[in-house]
Amino acid sequence: MKKRIIFGLLAVFFLGLLVRTWKLTEYPVSLSMDEVSIGYNAYSILRTGKDEHGASLPLAFKSVGDYKPPVDIYLTSVSMAIFGMNEFAVRFPVALIGALSIVVLVALVRLLGLSWTASLFSGFWLAILPWHIHFSRASFEAITALFFLLAGSVIFILWVKKRRLIYSISSAALFSLSVWTYHAERVFVPLLVISLFWIFKDQINLKNGKTKKQALFFLITTLIFAIPFLRLLFFTPAIKERALSTSIIREQSLANFLHRGDYKNLVEYIFDNDSYLIFRHWLGKYLNYYDFRLWFWKGMQFTPPEYQGVGFLYVVDLPLFLFGLYALTQSKNKKLKSLALFWFLAGPLSASLTMNEQHPLRALVWIPFFGITLASGVDFISKKLKLTKPALIYIVLALFNFVYFTDIYIKQFPRYYSEYWQYGYKQIALYACENKDNHDDIFVSESFGTKSDITGLPHLYLLFYCKYDPAEYLIDPSIDNIKIKRPYWIEDQYEYKNSLFIAAPWDFPIEDVPEQAIIKKLEFVNNEPSFIFVDTGKLVF
Amino acid sequence: MIMKLFGLYNKHKNKHSLILLILILSPVVWSLLFQPISVISEVVKAPQYIKTNISSIFASSNLRHVEEMRWNAFGEEKNELLSTIFYNKVGVLFNKFFDLFSMLSPRLFFQSGDGTQFSPTGIEPVASVLIIFWFLGIYQLLKQKKYKTLYLIPVAALPAFVAGQRNIVFLFPLLILYLHIVIVGMRDSLKKIKSKNRVIVILLIYGLFIIGRWLLL
């Protein structure tokens, strides 16, 4: 039995690792802005001990418009020390952590009292879950935070069961690391910890001296992690800036109606109060997450709204999910029920407090609820029925869904959305670095896109792909003769004689540029033109 | 006095009093009652809506999306077997089928409304605070194995689904069912709450607030 469990665990882990690392640098099609930012800052930390802005071993990394949490950047530094400064080194740590999360989820489900079959099923389910695969592959901090969160919960339950001081301290440390890793956990983790203490209050029994001491150590560990966090919160813009920049209050559909204290009369003050408007707006966003279409059909936004797509979960999970809900309500395991209920209600809370509707990344913290529910469904079925036939049917349909997801992910998604992954800046950076000596100046535009005018961060791609020495960049924050600038063609063609302009065709516009001056053209994955390279040295006046 | 009037002062055995309370907290019901002619005219249009909806399922725009995805899928050849298996009219039907699920979302009833004249402007069709009892009601129905109500949920959304109209008139059966679920949740939870009168007063004040908001703004 033990051997079979270990084999099962290894099988789901390696399956998860395989789907998270297969052609890791090719899908998603390009490093995102966040990924190159993490990558270059990690490189800078590795080489100089400072971030790109010169701060020594910072706890919050200044970025464009906000601050990045530190954990993933330091993990990427370690990865770069092993694999070198490349795309794989940026993406691998989160992909590995994503695969490790599978093992931790199995442990959590098992510790909550479900069978090994159900627990291993939850691991298999997470291994092939589109919601988790995508964000694991694209180096999103939310995956690392979820891992710490799950591990913290597992160790917490172990502490409740075994009463060892090391578990108490480790659990607090893991929960705290989760808060340090991603923004959504800043709201969710405190609620989860309070709920865990409430759910397991009978077993924790704080009247017992030994438990009391261990709980005190839990608190002390939390404080050790919390003090620098609170310092950042109250004395720097690092935490506040992010909260403000993503808050629902900034959303136009709400902001336009807020009075901000300027009420015309008492009736307006009572019946159109800002508190009510904010509450109602928030509730709409919160309830928006309780949508089967989002969960099972369209949540991942890999395709445009009117096309068929992929949900957070597979369609095949729907009947099992309903079984799971039923099993949970009938379960006599109060702790399992309470924790599932908490996760069900609190899962989308952080996401609903921010801008954007139905945000799959910010709702990632919700995954354990679905895992627990589906595992409960399997547990229920396996006790009532012979499992062989339903299991076979599920596996066949899940594989069918997986093939469908794979096609959507590697063929359809890049085609529809490559530009939102800053596709093209890598090629631009490599070309610019290789050819910088052939031109007086190279100008790269930060504006591009076919569907809308997107503002990118080309300087980060240049720093990353040119492997620009961070020590030099700290002394002089420029990249040789490569500059970030949109073309103003009417004047630039005369002013910069032997220069290279790289920008979207519409930014010149292309009709005004003589054909002989266009030395290179780039396209997005859907074959739409993305950038043209215009050499002013080839112009004939 | 108010609570005596509603028969809510003591134990909540009186189902009718709860229904009355729920109706006060559901401006959408009053909104529908005040516009009988518009409601009837919507119902009269139902056959036309159904016809248009059914004929639009395999409309050329939808099939074009399938073609487009098929073209881009798997191999380079357009009509490769795998592409045909995964991208076809079944996908269009699934897309349509999930419209039914999205109509079940409580958001439409407890927060946003349907955007038509039938949803009272600027307020929620059913008081937002009742969503708590809706969740509790669903939980109670599952716990007590009263599945009939739960099975009826997708059935109640069928008129709106078939007509292809996210409209309170066609979603009225679902509205009634959801209000019933709220009553189930309310009845059960009020039994367990010691300060139930305080809860009812809060609900009544909220009811007055949204009615005031509806009438005065």
Image (cartoon, rainbow, N blue to C red):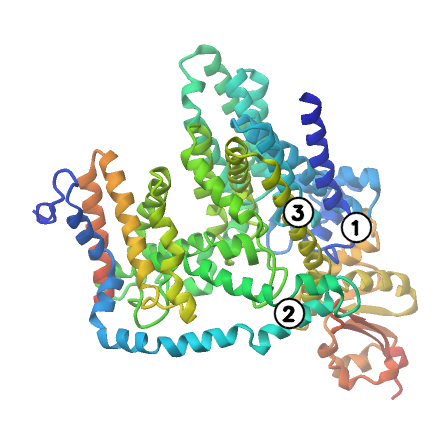
Residue pictured at 78% horizontal, 79% vertical? A492
Question: Mark 2 against mark 1, which lies toward the viewer?
Answer: 2
Residue of label 2: B66
Q: Using the image as rendered, state which of residue A469 and residue A307 is in the foreground.
A: A307
Q: Residue at x 64, y 52 (%)?
A: A401
> Is residue A138 shown above or below B48?
above
| Chain of the residue that carries numbered disc 2 in the rendered image | B
Q: In the rendered image of this protein, does residue A34 appear above or below residue A182?
A: below
Query: Where is B79 relative to A66, above or below?
Result: below
Which amino acid is tagged 2?
Val
Residue at left offset 33%, top offset 40%: B140
Q: Which mark is residue A396?
A: 3
Judged from the image, the secondary structure of the residue bearing numbered disc 1 is loop
| Quadrant position of residue A259 | bottom left
Q: Is residue A326 visible?
A: yes
The residue type indicated by label 3 comes to: Val
Q: Amino acid at mark 1?
A: Lys
Tell me, for residue A23, which label it has, or none: 1
Question: In the orientation shown, which residue stands out farthest toward the right?
Answer: A438
* Label 1 neighbour load within 10 Å: few <14, some 14-19, many 20+: few
Locate residue B165 relative to residue A425 in the image: left or right. left
Residue A406, image x, y percentages: 70, 54
